[in-house]
Amino acid sequence: MKKLLFTKCLMSASVALGMISAVGVMPASAKTVSVTKYGARPNDNKDDTAAIQAALRANPNGTVTIPKGKFICSVIWLYGNTTLKLSKKTTMKLKKFKTHPEDAWIVYHTKKGGYKGFKHIKISGGVWDGGVHGDSKTNQHKGIEVDHGTNLEISHMTFKNFAGIHMIETNACKNVNIHHVKFKNIYYFKGKLKSKVINHISPQYCEAIEFDQAIKSVAYAQPWDNTPCRNVKITNCTFDNVQAGIGHHHSEDAACVKHPHNNVTISNNTFKNIKGSCIHMMNIHNGKCFNNVMYKSQINYISSGGNTKNLQFGNNVIKDPADAESFAYEGNEYGLVKG
């Protein structure tokens, strides 16, 4: 009996030690840290890029926060499975940087193909101010580019005062949820094209949110293995005075036609003063486009093309169109509101 009791005690001790050991080997990065721990200071008008980058590099799999106040930075590279969280009262000011292949402010790239690059990335909060006030010849940068992974959430951010390209670009990603993001004042880029990747600067092709396949002719998302996006939801976003709204515009590219996106939902978004199309539903299988409100915009409000199957449209409202070419699909409300 004593031997049995002793054995049970040893087993209990082993389990306890195992639990302690498991806790002990948990990466120190699996926690929440502020960029201020790494030297960033709000409202000091100094470059915070190095401090923000150090926080992200030291805390893969954890949450990095940026508190309220104004911070200045250039390119931010995400590591591993990251959460980047900003206060509602945080303002990020873009420090101008030389054009690089991504042309983006926040970047995640990987050498892994398919959806194997990351297991989760979450970015939320803050006002991201590109500092462009009017059509530009010198500034052309994206807000976010994330490629090759699973479970991407971008929410409650504001992008304003940019020129040229997409504010959010997600390529070869699965389970994408973009919601409650505001886009305001994305101006036309009049300068020379500096990127080998960006070959369209027409308003029609500069969606504030774009999703692409990992195809060399359309995105920088290496490895170029033709992986499309799957399970994409874009909801409750607002777009005001931007070049184009949401979508994928490569309707005639042979590789894009061969590898369509699957299961895309665009709903409950508001568009105003759009220069190009509000929504591109191109090369999509199983797409839904419901309850979007579009007014005072130009060209096509909702357009589709390429290899599309099983697209559903309903309860989309078009008001006060700014161009005679504007149209909506059958089953949607086409409302002309004058005065």
Image (cartoon, rainbow, N blue to C red):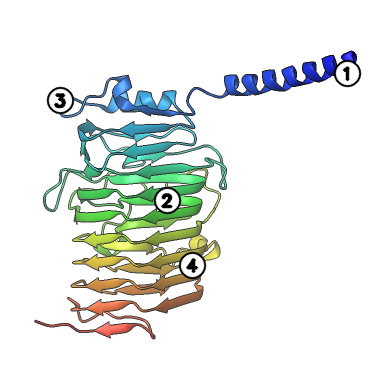
Q: Nearer the viewer, residue 175 or 214?
A: 175
Q: Are marks 1 and 3 in contact (CB under 8 Å)?
A: no
Earlier sequence position, callout 1 versus callout 2: 1
Q: Which residue is mark 3?
A: 44
The residue identified by callout 1 is: 4
- Discs 1/3, front: 1
Name the amino acid type tagged 4: Ile
Q: Is residue 140 left or right of residue 124?
A: left
Tell me what residue is drawn at x 24 percent, y 46 percent. 140
- The structure residue drawn at horizontal position 27% and vertical position 33%, both measured from the top left corner, is 67
**Tag 4 residue:** 284
Residue at the spot of label 2: 170
Separation (CA) of disc 3 from disc 2 = 33 Å
**Which image quarter: residue 82?**
top left
- The kind of residue on which mark 2 rests is Thr
N-terminal of the two: label 1 or label 4?
Answer: 1
Please report whichever mark, 1 or 3, sits nearer to the chain's N-terminal start.
1
The answer to which image quadrant residue 207 occupies is: bottom left
Rendering coords of residue 234 (x, y %): 39, 60
| Residue 216 seen by the camera | no
User: Badges 4 and 3: C-beta atoms under 8 Å apart?
Assistant: no
Label 3 neighbourhood size at 10 Å, few (<14), some (14-19), many (20+)?
few
Crowd tier of the residue under label 1, counting other residues whose Cα lies within 10 Å: few below 14, some 14–19, many 20 or above: few
